[in-house]
Image (cartoon, rainbow, N blue to C red):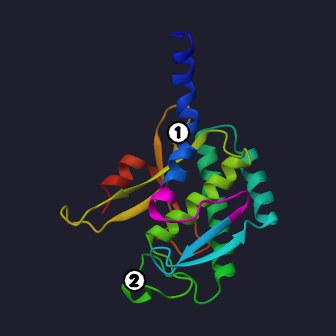
Amino acid sequence: MLKVLPLLFLAAPAIAGPLAAQRWFHERGYVEPIGSRIIACHGYGCTRRLALSVDGGLLSRASGMLRSAQGSPTAERQALAEVIRSYTAYLAASLGGKPDVPGSPAQMSGVHGQMDCLDETANTTSLLLVLQEHGLLAHHVVEHPESRGFFLDGRYPHFTAVITEKRSGAGWAVDPWKKAPGQRPEILPLDQWRQDS
């Protein structure tokens, strides 16, 4: 029995990420991706939802970019930024209406196609889980999204998708919230993201 426990302990981190990310969807009452089908959130706080499949062309391009970037975690993150850039443009086109305004202006709350940080986090985490399920992430695991700020510290609450480097365990924020659709997201060390306002 003691010989089995270390093996179980070593196996736990490999499955903790996806399960933790999926748990976040359930905690929020959102729908996690199934296969290549996602429920895209918009309207702020995922009040509006659109079921769509990740376009085969997008998935094929993502596969090419990520497979060519398997040399290092840094290269994979750079490729992920490009994949997410394409994905946010795809989402904006799929949702229709006025393209998402970066940064969640209050007057855009409830407007079709507009996304706050919760919508962006859900949509980005969904894509990351689809990529992971297709075996396209060689150096990273998708994790439970993170938040920062809670009013008492003078910062408005903000969420982001998270990936962790498999080898080093370093966490990375994957945050397209400040960017317009079709622009590269911020991908920065999670500790640095937590300190930002």
The residue range painted magenta reads: 24-37
Q: Residue at x 52, y 16 (%)?
A: 6
Quadrant where the N terminus is found in the figure: top right
**Sequence-first tag of 2 and 1:** 1
Provide the residue designation for mark 2. 105
Question: Which class describes the residues within 10 Å of circle 1: few (<14), some (14-19), or many (20+)?
Answer: some
Residue that protrudes farthest toward the front in the picture: 1
Quadrant where the C terminus is found in the figure: bottom left
Q: Residue at x 47, y 77 (%)?
A: 102
Question: Which class describes the residues within 10 Å of circle 2: few (<14), some (14-19), or many (20+)?
Answer: few
Q: Is residue 174 magenta?
A: no
Observer able to see residue 84 = yes
Q: Residue at x 63, y 79 (%)?
A: 92
Q: What percent of the width, then of the height, locates residue 50? A: 64, 77
Q: Residue at x 26, y 63 (%)?
A: 150
Q: Is residue 28 magenta?
A: yes
Q: Amino acid at mark 1?
A: Ala
Provide the residue designation for mark 1. 16
Q: What percent of the width, then of the height, locates residue 108? A: 44, 87
